[in-house]
């Protein structure tokens, strides 16, 4: 996109939804055609290699494969308001540019970083006038729409409702939290996934062989291992991968005998200043390592736990993914044997979110070591699974009357709350009262172990059950 907030329309040959793009002129959004961009000296490789057609887009087949609704709407020029949600470098802006070249509608591009409410209202007024005077729609693309505040987002709403504009919003943040509910309800959210290593490698090889826009005219040999390492290092971000490739090729040494530059894995490691760990976040090794982390902590081995944490983080794994696994482990494998374990795991997650990486790595390591050295119990995990099985397979009995709330006179007349015993009014704050449905009376889901704090919980439960039993027996004798 240009540096301007939004560029004035340029006189161009209008292209239909299925017509070939005009390679020599700007489109009506002021977005320059790709061939012009490729010819500009100094244009980054990632910009030059932007896909020009839907068929060139890699890694988003879930939404752009032939016959998919979004692709059909784009090709037939029947697009409605959409939100494109995905990580950086997955093709959100690229897709908007392709739409700009294919649509017959007037196309306006905004950057939420630069735009203000005044500019938005001006474009909305022009869109309304254009629709009334010529019947022509306006497609408004807002990059980083999550940066718009509520008032700015609200400015789009009347024109979206009236059909004067079709809104395309691009965001890296969850639209549920960052886009107004009213605007979100009138838009279809399409999720662009982070590219897997195979898709990134395809993009890199395309750049290496493209003589028009890429590095095809450069005498360079790049090893398969280097391509795989760049694809892994990029973490699903095509832009990052192409930037690293361009930098590494420029820095690669030339063979004096052949005058051909050579880029292999050791040379690449010099470019990125760290070891290019081979780690496929969606492949077998990803699951092998997270399994190794879980089992090491479960087996109370802090040395192995911190090693597997480091293996993932140094390879570029999402630290919040690691944090989520630690939180799960704290409740599944430690539970009430050490209630503080869950607190520590959540605190590590918050620390990583607050200070980011790489500083957050020690918070995750601290949590992993704490969890590995905590007393272990899966009693909570077993209890939930047993209760869930009954919830799914047993009859959904009504809540016993004595446990129901009775805020109205009618409910009281229907015996809601009748027989309820307020525990605080009972000796030891324990009432001889069943709290499960009648068909499940006496069922025990939670059986604490003798380890850690659960030993104390077990002592309490046994004492409470003895108290309840004696009081129940007393009530029965009085009857």
Image (spheres, rainbow, N blue to C red):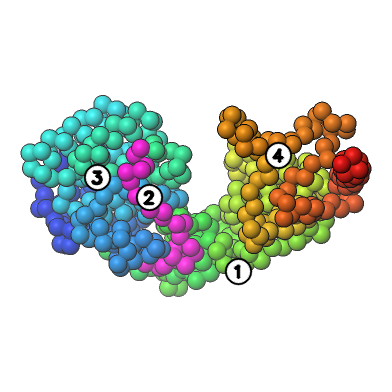
Tell me which residue sits at (60%, 57%) in the image: 315
Instruction: Inspect the magenta stretch and tell me whether residue 200 lies in it.
Output: yes
Tell me which residue sits at (88%, 31%) in the image: 427
Q: Which badge, 3 or 2, comes first in the chain's sequence?
A: 3
Q: Where is residue 127 drawn, in percent x and y?
A: 17, 37
Q: Where is residue 359 drawn, in percent x and y?
A: 64, 41
**Cα distance in 3D space between marks 3 and 4:** 55 Å
In this rendering, does residue 368 appear at all? no
**Cα distance in 3D space between marks 2 and 4:** 46 Å
Q: Say what secondary structure mark 1 lies in.
A: helix
**Cα distance in 3D space between marks 4 and 1:** 53 Å
**Cα distance in 3D space between marks 2 and 1:** 30 Å
Instruction: Give the residues drawn in magenta, as a range.
Output: 182-208
Which of the 4 image quadrants contains residue 295? bottom right
The 10 Å Cα crowd at callout 3, few under 14, some 14 to 19, many 20 or more, is many
The 10 Å Cα crowd at callout 4, few under 14, some 14 to 19, many 20 or more, is some
Q: Which residue is mark 4?
A: 402
Q: Which residue is mark 1?
A: 284
Q: Which badge, 4 or 1, comes first in the chain's sequence?
A: 1
Tell me if label 3 and label 1 are in contact, CB under 8 Å.
no
Q: Where is residue 403 drawn, in percent x and y?
A: 69, 39
Q: Where is residue 90 drawn, in percent x and y?
A: 41, 55
Q: Which residue is mark 3?
A: 166
């Amino acid at each position: 996109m240009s540096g301007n907030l939004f560029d004035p329309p340029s006189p161009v040959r209008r292209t239909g939804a299925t017509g070939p793009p005009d390679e020599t002129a700007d489109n009506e959004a002021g977005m320059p055609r790709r061939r012009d961009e490729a010819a500009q000296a100094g244009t980054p490789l990632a910009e030059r290699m932007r896909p020009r057609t839907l068929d060139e887009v890699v890694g988003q087949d879930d939404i752009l494969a032939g016959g998919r609704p979004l692709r059909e709407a784009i090709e037939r020029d029947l697009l409605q308001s959409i939100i494109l949600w995905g990580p950086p470098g997955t093709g959100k802006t690229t897709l908007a540019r392709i739409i700009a070249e294919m649509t017959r509608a007037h196309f306006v591009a905004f950057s939420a970083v630069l735009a203000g409410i005044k500019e938005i209202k001006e474009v909305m007024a022009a869109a309304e006038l254009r629709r009334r005077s010529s019947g022509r729609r306006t497609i408004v693309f807002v990059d980083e729409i999550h940066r718009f505040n509520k008032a700015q987002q609200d400015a789009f709403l009347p024109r979206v409702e009236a059909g004067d504009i079709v809104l395309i919003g691009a965001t890296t943040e969850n639209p549920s939290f960052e886009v107004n509910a009213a605007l979100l309800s009138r838009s279809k959210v399409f999720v662009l996934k982070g590219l897997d290593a195979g898709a990134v490698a395809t993009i890199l090889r395309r750049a290496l062989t493209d003589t028009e826009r890429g590095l095809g005219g450069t005498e360079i040999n790049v090893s398969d291992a280097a391509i795989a390492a760049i694809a892994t290092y990029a973490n699903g971000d095509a832009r990052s991968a192409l930037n690293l490739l361009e930098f590494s090729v420029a820095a690669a040494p030339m063979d004096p005998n052949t005058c051909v530059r050579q880029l292999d894995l050791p040379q690449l490691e010099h470019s990125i200043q760290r070891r290019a760990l081979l780690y496929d976040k969606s492949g077998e090794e990803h699951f092998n390592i997270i399994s190794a982390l879980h089992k090491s902590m479960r087996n109370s081995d802090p040395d192995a736990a911190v090693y597997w944490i480091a293996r993932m983080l140094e390879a570029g794994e999402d630290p919040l993914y690691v944090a989520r696994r630690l939180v799960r482990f704290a409740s599944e494998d430690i539970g009430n044997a050490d209630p503080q374990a869950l607190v520590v795991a959540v605190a590590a997650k918050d620390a990583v979110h607050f200070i980011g990486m790489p500083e957050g790595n020690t918070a995750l390591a601290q949590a992993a070591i704490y969890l590995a050295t905590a007393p272990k119990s899966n009693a909570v995990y077993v209890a939930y699974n047993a209760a869930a099985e009954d919830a799914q397979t047993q009859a959904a009995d009504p809540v016993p009357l004595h446990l129901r709330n009775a805020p109205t006179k009618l409910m009281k007349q229907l015996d809601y709350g009748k027989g309820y015993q307020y525990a605080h009014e009972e000796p030891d704050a324990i009432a001889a009262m069943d709290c499960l449905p009648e068909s499940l009376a006496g069922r025990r889901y939670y059986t604490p172990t003798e380890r850690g704090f659960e030993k104390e919980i077990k002592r309490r439960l046994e004492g409470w059950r003895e108290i309840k039993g004696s009081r129940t027996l007393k009530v029965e004798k009085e009857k």
